[in-house]
Amino acid sequence: MPLRSLPPANSAPHRNETWEYWRPTGSPTLELGSVRGLDVALPLHFHDEDQVTFTLSGRRRFVIDDELFCVTPGQGMHIPARTPHHSLSEPSEVVCVNIYTPAGTGAARDLISALVRHWRRTGRMDWPDLTMMAADHGLLAGSAPGAAIGLASPDSWETVRQAAQRAGMSREGFSRRFKKWHGLPPHGFWLLEKLNEARRLLRAGEPIAAVAAEAGFSDQSHLGRCFRRAFGVTPGRYRAERCRAG
């Protein structure tokens, strides 16, 4: 699917966002995505992968640690793996692409420079272009970052109170310190851990009901509501796009 530099002049803006994902085979790129629309806001979330966002038209705004970042046409932004962030709706239509690579394996600055050069030279992007550039810059960085300080497996933490007891802290003190460390309260962080596990299972082609159970959701509907709110698409659509060929 070509990604044009601007939406066709005779097309009406998309009031709701339109997300698409593509997973090329034989490439170090883990996942490619695109979004077009006005309502491109997503709530606070994070990814297990590094993310590079490149804007084709309109603007994309992200908030990280209460700081606003604006990505305008022909610009890119790197969001490191497991960095909590949220995005804002826009008054004019946005068209942008995302490249997700395994944490710590992508040379983000060099990749963004390549995207900028390609954009200035051709004024367009498509899936093969993104795949090639991501492959060229996907294995040039150092090792993956270490685990976050103070985290234990959320599977072993049934409640915040139990987690606080393990850390020898009060429930309130633990929650405050956890949010300071990770940018999210414990329950929000653990929900996103489960959603990222669901993404991994869906990419592998697991049935949605099985994914919901294995990732720790009460049922398939619960997974669907949370997944759509965090990532912009339903689990069914995300799973269906796991094997699109280039």
Image (cartoon, grey):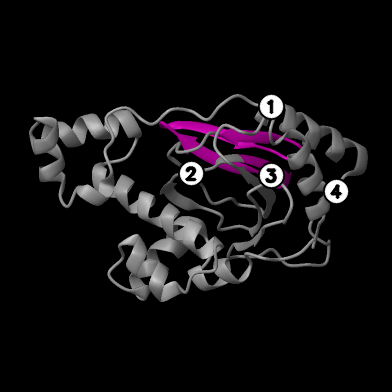
Which range is magenta?
52-79
What SS does tag 4 mark? loop
Q: Is residue 189 visible?
A: yes
User: For the residues marked 1 and 4, what is the alpha-carbon distance in whole angstroms?
Assistant: 20 Å
User: For the residues marked 3 and 1, what is the alpha-carbon distance in whole angstroms?
Assistant: 17 Å
Q: Nearer the viewer, mark 4 or mark 2?
A: 2
Instruction: Please report contact status of discs 3 and 2: CB closer than 8 Å, yes or no.
Output: no
Q: Is residue 123 left or right of residue 71?
A: right
Q: Amino acid at mark 4?
A: Arg
User: For the residues marked 4 and 2, what is the alpha-carbon distance in whole angstroms?
Assistant: 28 Å
Q: Nearer the viewer, residue 11 or 97?
A: 97
Instruction: State the image coordinates of residue 157 (x, y, percent, origin top left).
Output: 19, 47
What SS does tag 1 mark? helix
Label of residue 48 in the image: 2
Q: Is residue 126 visible?
A: no
Instruction: Report which residue position mark 1 lands on.
Output: 109
Q: Is residue 171 left or right of residue 201?
A: left
User: Which badge, 4 or 3, comes first in the chain's sequence?
Assistant: 3
User: Which badge, 4 or 2, comes first in the chain's sequence?
Assistant: 2
Instruction: Report which residue position mark 3 lands on.
Output: 28
Instruction: State the image coordinates of residue 114 (x, y, percent, origin top left).
Output: 80, 33
Q: Nearer the viewer, mark 3 or mark 1?
A: 3
Q: Amino acid at mark 1?
A: Arg
Q: Nearer the viewer, mark 4 or mark 3?
A: 3
Q: Nearer the viewer, mark 1 or mark 4?
A: 1
Question: How dense is the environment of label 2, judged by Cα within 10 Å: few (below 14), some, or many (20 and up)?
Answer: some
Question: How dense is the environment of label 1, judged by Cα within 10 Å: few (below 14), some, or many (20 and up)?
Answer: some
Q: Is residue 211 magenta?
A: no
Instruction: State the image coordinates of residue 191 (x, y, percent, origin top left).
Output: 32, 53
Q: Nearer the viewer, residue 13 or 217?
A: 217
